[in-house]
Amino acid sequence: MACDAFAHVESISARPLLIASSKADTRYFSEEAVAQAKEPAEVFVADGATHIDQYDKPEFVPQMVAKLTDFYAKRL
């Protein structure tokens, strides 16, 4: 609980950073991390998904996989 991950965003920048889920309770953490990160950084939002939905709900998994594949193929 004492760890402040945001204090270390610069140490991982510039690395590809992509975060998603419109209904995630922690979405604001994602947006803050991307705002502090160096490029390439992007917030991809799976509309209507919770954090867990993006891993196992058929309506979200294909779009997440497609976005991640495209994002990392261009940046790694």
Image (tube, grey):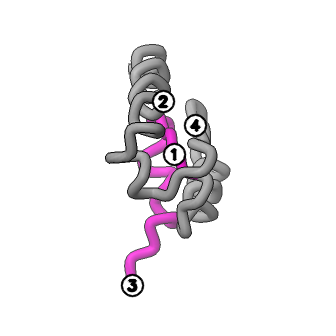
Compared to residue 69, the image places residue 46 above or below, namely: below
Label 2 vs 4, first from the N-terminus: 4
Q: Which of the pair 25/19 is nearer the observer?
A: 25
Residue 19 has which mark? 1
Q: Which of the pair 16/66 is nearer the observer?
A: 66
Which residue has dot 4 on it? 41
Q: Residue furthest left?
A: 56
Give amino acid for label 1.
Answer: Ile
In percent of the image, x 49 and y 39: which residue is there?
A: 17
Q: Nearer the viewer, mark 1 or mark 3?
A: 1
Q: Which of the pair 25/8 is nearer the observer?
A: 25
Q: Nearer the viewer, mark 1 or mark 2?
A: 2
Whether the magenta-drawn stretch holds residue 69 is answered as no
Label 1 vs 3, first from the N-terminus: 3
Q: Residue furthest front?
A: 58
Identify the image quadrant of residue 62: top left
Please identify the quadrant where the C terminus is shown.
top left
Give amino acid for label 2.
Answer: Gln
Compared to residue 5, the image places residue 33 above or below, namely: above
Which residue has dot 3 on it? 2
Give amino acid for label 3.
Answer: Ala
Give amino acid for label 4.
Answer: Ala
Q: Nearer the viewer, mark 2 or mark 4?
A: 2
Which residue has dot 2 on it? 63
Q: Nearer the viewer, mark 4 or mark 1?
A: 1
